[in-house]
Amino acid sequence: MELPRRQDQGLPERKGQKRKLEEETKEEPEISFPPSGDTRHALLCEVTAQVNVLNSTFSWREADRAAAKRATHVLAELAKNEEVVNVIVEGGAVPALVKHLLAPSSCEGDPTPKPFEHEVEKGSAFALGLLAIKPEHQQLIVDSGALSHLVALLRRHKDGSSSRAVISVIRRAADAITNLAHENSIIKTRVRMEGGIPPLVELLEFTDTKVQRAAAGALRTLAFKNDENKNQIVECNALPTLILMLRSEDAAIHYEAVGVIGNLVHSSPNIKREVLAAGALQPVISLLSSCCSESQREAALLLGQFAATDSDCKVHIVQRGAVGPLIEMLKSPDVQLREMSAFALGRLAQDTHNQAGIAHNGGLVPLLKLLDSKNGSLQHNAAFALYGLADNEDNVSDFIRVGGVQKLQDGEFIVQATKDCVAKTLKRLEEKIHGRVLNHLLYLMRISEKPVQRRVALALAHLCSPEDQRTIFIENNGLELLLGLLGSASPKQQFDGAVALYKLANKAMTLSPIDAAPPSPTPQVYLGEQYVNNATLSDVTFLVEGRRFYAHRICLLASSDAFRAMFDGGYREKDARDIEIPNIRWEVFELMMRHSYLIQRIIPEIRNYFARALTKPNQHNLRQ
């Protein structure tokens, strides 16, 4: 991706710009003038004065060169404050600076040393690069003829000189091209038309690492969303050098290199194949462990691009060791790093064996934690990766064991696409609750620690088929686990248990008459859900958390022996109109009562469990 322009937007600033300012101007503080009133007038006068100097000193005279160098320096210092850039442009600085990108004419073969050789051109390129930070000035600078001069500066070393001044002017020219072309497709094309790409590719092999970085930064910008530029960069044989740069121990070098390759590969399957054939895969995987978080992020993004459509590449990426570092990146405090690693894992998780490997290596829990993120893009990438992992039967038990189903059900998802993805993930899990997966879950429900047993029971209440309810909840004591949640001190566990029982009741009523138990000889009363908490014909009221719940004895008496014991047995409130129910939340009680009105149609064992759940919280307080 192209480097963003502003640091204060919460994104990384364009690499190199701030660093370069600090390197060469440590002794002078940044100037900050609000462009209004007397200050603006004074600033404009200063700019005009420096422009006049530049316009009158285009010669090799030492005094002229010194004055021109000083003028470019002053304008560059002013341009570091973006608030005054418009005033600098208004003062006519652009044509004057462009003029000084060229060296003055001299007699051919003149052996006289040239004062401040390359220095004025360097200062002009630097100042123009700063002015190009504002998009509205990019075209003005190009229309003034800057591009051809900047491209010529890229070749200054061709005369055999490798002085510090030559190195600096080449670097400043590359930086200026980067800023001029930033997010400007017209200027990107103009750079190619002016012949700027071949010298930039050559500079990737320059002896000075700062020049290498500047050249790579320019190529990165030029390659972004410009197919013709991408093709020319590849045709100039940039890939072998870029791949060597990926292996550099200098983080700034390998960061720029992976950025160029990422932009070349984006939406270009042919170039992606060339990049892989050139040997990029292993060095990119190695960058996942870079000391530079930005390089890690770019490497993860690039691996996701490699894996997007190529099934073989998905497998190769995992075989070569990418999964462990990507999972570690999921735990990073850097939001963008977490997002890119989730993106890469989501693409890798489209392969069956990768799905099992990612879960086995510990990817499941950190991905589930990312669902709590308030960043919509991060949340969606995590959800997509989990959708992939849920496709493998070997992961289903782990998904449920760590509470993944509850996490998916309880999550607050920001965008609709994430909500849809989560719904599809739950559906995937539901479709796999049979055969060996169900047997494993029943095994966990028998032998695991209580928290895991409860998670399994809760998940199965939502995901199992109605035909398996008796096996899970009667024969393997799943209902006992759910009822235990109702007595929990945690309101969340109470609510989860009640919702699970509610879900079970709904599923149980879908059983066909053949599957259901024989009719009970006890007379049945079915009032229907419309009578839940309805004062019509109500003859008993429950008080829960200070709120009244209207009920009907005839329905409750018919529902089970437990309610008959409450109203006909040895309880002091058997004739009371108002019965207080302590130690249970209103929401939980309402869910349970709602289905006491429906459980007449449920198989007897489950019906009795529901009734016991309703009466259990109060029995110790109601006995005489």
Image (tube, rainbow, N blue to C red):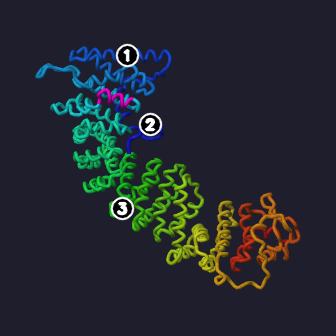
Mark 3 highlights which residue?
314
| SS class, disc 2 | helix
Mark 3 residue type: Lys
Q: Nearer the viewer, residue 346 or 565?
A: 346
At 54% across and 49% down in the image, what residue appears? 374
Closest to the observer, 570 or 288? 288
Q: Earlier in the sequence, mark 3 or mark 2?
A: 2
On residue 7, which mark appears? 2
Residue contact between numbered discs 1 and 2, judged by CB atoms under 8 Å: no
Name the main secondary structure of what is drawn in magenta: helix
Mark with earlier residue (1, 2): 2
The residue depicted at 58 percent of the width and 63 percent of the height is 406
* Three-letter code, disc 1: Thr
Q: Tag 2: residue type?
A: Gln
As displayed, is residue 297 above or below residue 550? above
Q: Give the side of residue 497 with respect to residue 559, left or right.
A: left
Mark-to-mark CA distance, 3 and 2: 34 Å
Q: Quadrant of residue 537?
A: bottom right
In the picture, the quarter occupied by the N terminus is top left
Q: Quadrant of residue 581?
A: bottom right
Q: Which residue is mark 1?
A: 48
Bounds of the magenta segment: 137-146
> Callout 3: few (<14), some (14-19), or many (20+) C-alpha neighbours within 10 Å?
many
In front: mark 1 or mark 2? 1
Please tell me which of labels 1 and 3 falls first in the chain: 1
What mark, if any, has residue 66 been given in the picture?
A: none
What residue is at 77 percent from the left and 66 percent from the top?
532
